[in-house]
Amino acid sequence: MDRNIRVGAVSYLNTKPLIYGFEKGEMRNEVDLVVAYPSKIATMLANDEIDVGLVPVAIIPKLKEHYIISDYCIGSDGEVGSVCLFSEVPLEKIERVLLDYQSMTSVELLKILIKQYWKIDPVLISTSEDYRKDISGTTAALIIGDRALEQRKISKYKYDLGSEWKKFTGLPFVFAAWISNKKLDKSFIDTFNKANLTGLQQIDKVIDENPYQLFNLKSYYTSYINFYLDDKAREGLEYFLGILKTDTIQNHNKHSI
């Protein structure tokens, strides 16, 4: 490729360790980095505005071509902390759920848990701007990222989607992975992996450069977020994508009748 690889990453605290190396100048002659919220990065990848994205994995079935190019991801093996359903009432009393417009994966995960695990039937409401003030009475909301870490201090009830998925399936969950929409050279991928590892090996420096008072980032990075796309995480990812595929087929058949 006769230009830099265009790389998109999520602008949340949970990605800081993975993009630390790039922000410190690693691959500066090979990569152009852009950051935005998850669904924006996913749209850019689908539209070929970037070549690689740390994207919500629910975009995978919608891409014409895709490759998982890194051994690193944003996932959890149990409680994730920053992807939660927040409510003022217990789960069984929730009547409406406001959906976070910033991540399609978390929305799809929530729908699976609602239907197959919790077996409740609230009205799901799409959003396009900040809606946290609307959490009241029987109206709950899915919130992800840094805003979820803030909301943990406010809402009476919180249902952590990473934890609920683990109880439901016994598997880790992968929220976002490094996906390319075209084949890339192995040498690039090897160097890209090393750049990802830089921040993971210097977590204390990452924390020092991203001070945050509302949540213990050392605990967040070491006990909540799973950055490693190992075999078990890949199994959880494939299981999730399998459910998405099944639901898509069922919905298509339903509309075809």
Image (spheres, rainbow, N blue to C red):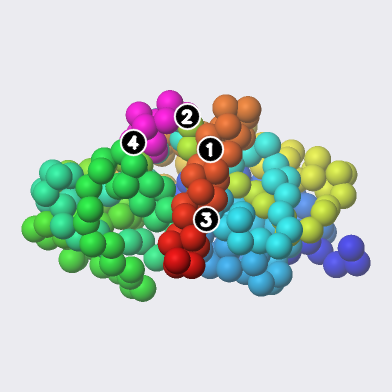
Circles 3 and 4, Cβ within 8 Å, touching? The answer is no
- Chain part drawn in magenta: 162-171
Circles 3 and 1, Cβ within 8 Å, touching? The answer is no
Image quarter where the C terminus lies is bottom left
Element assignment for label 1: helix
In this picture, residue 177 sits left or right of residue 170: right
Residue type at tag 1:
Tyr
The tag on residue 171 is 2
Element assignment for label 2: loop
Which mark is first along the chain, 2 or 4? 4
Which mark is first along the chain, 1 or 2? 2
Q: CA separation, marks 4 and 1?
A: 15 Å
In this picture, residue 134 sits left or right of residue 234: left
Circles 2 and 1, Cβ within 8 Å, touching? The answer is yes
In this picture, residue 191 sits left or right of residue 133: right
Q: Which is more toward the observer, 89 or 144? A: 89
Residue type at tag 3:
Ile
